[in-house]
Amino acid sequence: MLQVKNLKVNYGAISALHGISLEVKQGDIVTLIGANGAGKTTTLKAISGLLKVDGEVLYNGRNIANVAPHKLVGLGMAHVPEGRMVFANLTVAENLQMGAYLQRDKRAIEHDRAFVFSIFPRLAERQKQIAGTLSGGEQQMLAIGRALMSRPKFLMLDEPSLGIAPILVKTIFEKIVEINQKQGITILLVEQNANLALEVSRYGYVLETGHIILQDSSAALRQNPKVKSAYLGG
Amino acid sequence: MSEFLQQVINGLSLGAIYALIALGYTMVYGILRFINFAHSDVFMVGAFMGFYAGKILPHESMLGGIGALVFAMLVCAILGILIERFAYRPLREGSKLTVLITAIGVSLLLESGGQYLFGADPKSFPMMFPSKEFSLGGIAISSNQILVFVATAVLLVALQFIVLKTKIGTAMRAVSFNPQAASLVGINNDVVISFTFGIGSALAAVGGILYSSNYPSIDPYMGILPGLKAFVAAVLGGIGNIPGAAMGGILLGVIETFVNGSRYSTYTDAIAFTVLILILLFKPAGILGKLHVEKV
Ligand SMILES: Nc1ncnc2c1ncn2[C@@H]1O[C@H](COP(=O)(O)OP(=O)(O)OP(=O)(O)O)[C@@H](O)[C@H]1O
Ligand SMILES: [Mg+2]
């Protein structure tokens, strides 16, 4: 589904990604883990078109490097950005409406909204609330729900656990698996919480200062001594 | 008492015109966070389009008047969209200061371009709408003033409807809050920004025609002072805030009219602006403006 080849990103004179390559197969959950500042967010932004890049990003065989983000949404790509970025000045319902911005079919929108409410019932109760006044966890649900409203085939999540109580983190990860299994949506997951990320994913990449230093099945990565000591706190 | 009411009516009708212009400043600021200094010249072009429409369309008729309005709105909407497309968009990633300076450049270009195309000498604006004076218990109110009230009210309601209830309006608010997040849901920011410029410029065109109907001498530099005041009105109401811009415009119009009718009339602008500075000292974000609080 997605193949990244020799991807490079610079912020002015600073190079943040030094030519990374990775692959996400259809139907998979793949995770990208790494310490603060490793370049995880940069990778996702580069794929979704928010950053100018060098290298190739093949999406269903087509090179989409440097294609504008709003066009990629039309191709079935969705990106839940770091820090959620819900439209804090809009209501929950309006945020979801914007998620379906490119969708013309009213019935399909209704159907998707019902699906989003089925996995995040909290959002259904709070449709009229201004998104900026939601709790952090609720905002994360809204950000994911908004992304689902675009009917993605490929979903990128940037630290869905950020700033959320552990118990809610568990719920959100269960939902992510549910989205992958029920809707057949392919997922690329960026996480600081490597334990959790390697638990739900099938394959993983480890990013360190702009290089991919390790890649393996998630099960193997969890046993890898290097990963254990550096990222799993043991 | 009746003199007081008279001043209120005159002030409201002047303020309504400031409000129409202020909306364009505030909408563009809301979405791009910069002041489009060329907006006051779009207002001037609107007035001239009304003037030229008057060469063909019947005078003193509702049909002719509305025809002139529609024509000027169309031309100005296109002008506004072109200005954004060719002068501002290429600089969008650059510093705000660069865009600001470009806006001043575009403003000067429109003024000298107007001088070249329309001529530098003042022209007398035709009476496009039917004109009548009514008297209500000693208060004079002209059909022109009624027109200003009705047009402003209708346009304000329509604008609020677009911004609050339609999909494109919701997209405008989304882009205004976070353009990156907006692009990630599939919103083409360029389209939304063009739309914003188009609407703001069309409103300035209405302002230009209504202003010229009340002060019927037009020239290529006529936009400067009303434009400046409308800008101040937008800041006063809380820049980026649509109802705020309308309120700011009306407040400014009323203050100005009252000072003008007093024995301090020589100092009208000075006094009006002092009042504004005082208001801003106590409410720095403007009357309806609020500072965004973001959850992280
Ligand atoms: N806009 C920017 N300008 C300059 N440097 C940047 C910019 N954004 C990120 N960087 C730098 O690029 C590197 C990678 O940042 P990135 O945000 O991708 O890290 P990350 O892996 O997502 O970290 P975290 O886990 O803290 O979110 C960091 O060194 C960061 O300082
Ligand atoms: Mg990050």
Image (cartoon, coloured by chain):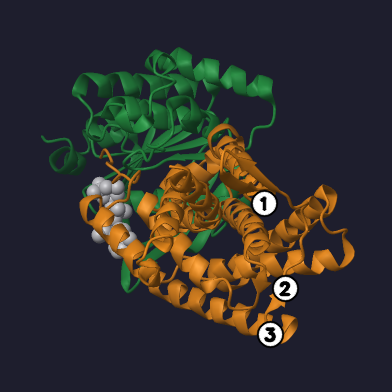
Chain identity of mark 1: B
User: Going by the image, does A211 lie left or right of B50?
Assistant: left
Q: Residues within 10 Å of mark 1 (few under 14, many from 20)?
A: many
Residue placed furthest toward the front: B138
Disc 3 target residue: B121
Whether disc 2's CB lies below 8 Å from ligand 1 is answered: no
Disc 1 target residue: B144
Q: Residues within 10 Å of mark 2 (few under 14, many from 20)?
A: some
Disc 2 target residue: B124
Give how far across and how far down residue A1 sits, in percent: 56, 41
Give how far across and how far down residue A163 sits, in percent: 22, 33
Say which of B128 and A196 sits in front.
B128
Camera-side mark, 2 or 3: 2
User: Going by the image, does B79 lie left or right of B288?
Assistant: right
Q: For residue A110, which quarter of the picture?
A: top right
Label 2 residue SS: strand
Q: Which chain is painted in green? A: A
Discs 3 and 1 lie in a common subunit: yes
Q: Colour of chain B?
A: orange
Which mark identifies residue B166? none
Label 3 residue SS: loop
